[in-house]
Image (cartoon, grey):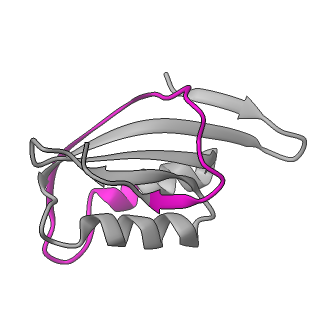
Amino acid sequence: MAQIYSGANRSLLTIHAMIYGRVQGVSYRYWTQAEARKRSLLGWVRNRSDGSVEAVFSGSNEDVAAMLKACWSGPMLASVRDIETSDYTDPVPEFFDILPTP
């Protein structure tokens, strides 16, 4: 179960997502950053050396759920075969950024 934080006006959900399929070389990270910023989400996205994309999304329950749903479609050339989510309790940046591949 993902971490849920309660604020004065809304609950914040922070999740870690691993996205598998044809998600590198198709502008998936840039698309993810743009979509996350549209939803006022905090977090980050990066390519992994195994060909997957890794992301952390933090925001309202509704916005995080909408982002995860959108991730199944991704940009036009992407083909997502699986998304795994898990708890994320590390600090989250106060913006949404693209990180380098680890």
Q: Residue at x 33, y 58 (%)?
A: 71
Q: Split into 4 quadrants, where in the image is the C terminus?
A: top left
Q: Residue at x 23, y 72 (%)?
A: 27
Q: Is residue 82 magenta?
A: yes
Give whichever of 78, 89 is nearer the camera. 89
Residue found farthest to the bottom: 76
Q: Residue at x 62, y 44 (%)?
A: 61
Examine the rendered structure and indicate whether residue 5 appears above or below residue 82. Answer: above
Examine the rendered structure and indicate whether residue 42 appears above or below residue 38. Answer: above
Point out residue 38 in the picture as x, y percentages from the top left corner.
Answer: 56, 72
In the picture, measured across the screen, residue 97 lies left or right of residue 42, that is left
Give whichever of 67, 87 is nearer the camera. 87
Residue found farthest to the right: 8
Point out residue 88 in the picture as x, y percentages from the top left corner.
Answer: 50, 29
Give whichever of 61, 29 is nearer the camera. 29
Point out residue 42 in the picture as x, y percentages from the top left corner.
Answer: 59, 53
Q: Is residue 54 magenta?
A: no
Q: Residue at x 55, y 29 (%)?
A: 90
In the picture, measured across the screen, residue 82 lies left or right of residue 55, that is left
Point out residue 5 in the picture as x, y percentages from the top left corner.
Answer: 72, 31
In the picture, measured across the screen, residue 21 lies left or right of residue 45, that is left
> How many numbered dots are placed on residues in this image?
0
Residue numbers of the magenta segment: 68-97
Examine the rendered structure and indicate whether residue 49 appears above or below residue 71. Answer: above
